[in-house]
Amino acid sequence: MKINQKGFGAVEGILVLIIVGLLCFIGWYVYDTKNKTDQTLETVDKTSNSSTTAASKSDTATTDKALITDAVTKDCESTAGSKASSINIYKLAGDYAAVTLACSNPQDGSNPTNRLYLKKNNKSWAIVVRGGGAPTTTEELKPFGFPANFLD
């Protein structure tokens, strides 16, 4: 061995390369694992959101049907003094609904079928048009704010 030797030897150079390579591998491994985890969580989140959205739409429709039935029943009781029967929600589109029902009249015993059109206001349903002479075409419903294709 020379006394005035300068620089690194082959063993030290190889040792530095091994350490740098090991640090690069560890960095790449952590980066790759994080990306795979993010992708998996994103997929799970999308799946969860779509099923939650479908469930919430179903819950809203069920709640709307119950609220519509309640509003129609109360209207029948207040106008005819009797219970509504044969309630049929034959059209429910967003904030608009069309219902047929039988609302018996206790004075003459008649049980006419009525057609009602309801509109949702602040999470409650209100009857907008009622009676046997209620509109039967979309054109007749336009003045009440119903969408153009409601009865189509």
Image (cartoon, rainbow, N blue to C red):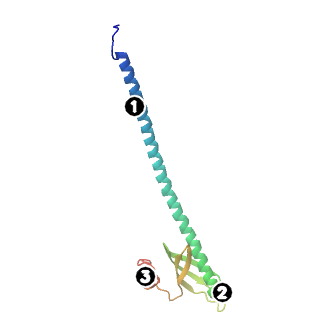
Distance CA(mark 3)–CA(mark 2):
31 Å
Viewer-nearest of labels 3 and 1? Answer: 1
Q: Please tell me whether mark 2 sits on a helix, a strand or a loop.
A: loop
Quadrant in the picture for residue 146: bottom left
Determine which residue is flagged by label 3.
138
Q: Label 3: few (<14), some or many (≥20) within 10 Å?
A: some
Q: CA distance from mark 3 to mark 1?
A: 70 Å
Question: Dot 2, crowdedness within 10 Å: few (<14), some or many (≥20)?
Answer: some
Q: Is residue 72 above or below residue 13?
A: below
In the rendered image, which quarter is residue 13 located in?
top left
Q: Are marks 2 and 1 in contact (CB under 8 Å)?
A: no
Labelled disc at residue 57: none
Residue 152 at x, y = what percent?
42, 77
Dot 1 surroundings within 10 Å: few (below 14), some, or many (20 or more)? Answer: few
Mark 2, residue position: 81
- The answer to whether residue 26 is above or below residue 47 is above
Q: Residue 23: give x, y in percent of width and height.
A: 42, 29
Q: Earlier in the sequence, mark 2 or mark 1?
A: 1
Instruction: Tell me the quarter of the image containing the N terminus.
Output: top left
Residue at figure coordinates x 64%, y 85% from the top left:
78
Q: 47 or 99: nearer the eye? A: 47
Callout 1: SS:
helix
Residue 24 bears which disc, if any?
A: 1
- Mark 2 or mark 1, which is nearer to you? 1
Based on the displayed image, in which of its 4 quarters is residue 131 positioned?
bottom right
Left of 40 or right of it: where is 70? right
Q: Are marks 3 and 1 in contact (CB under 8 Å)?
A: no
Label 3 secondary element:
helix
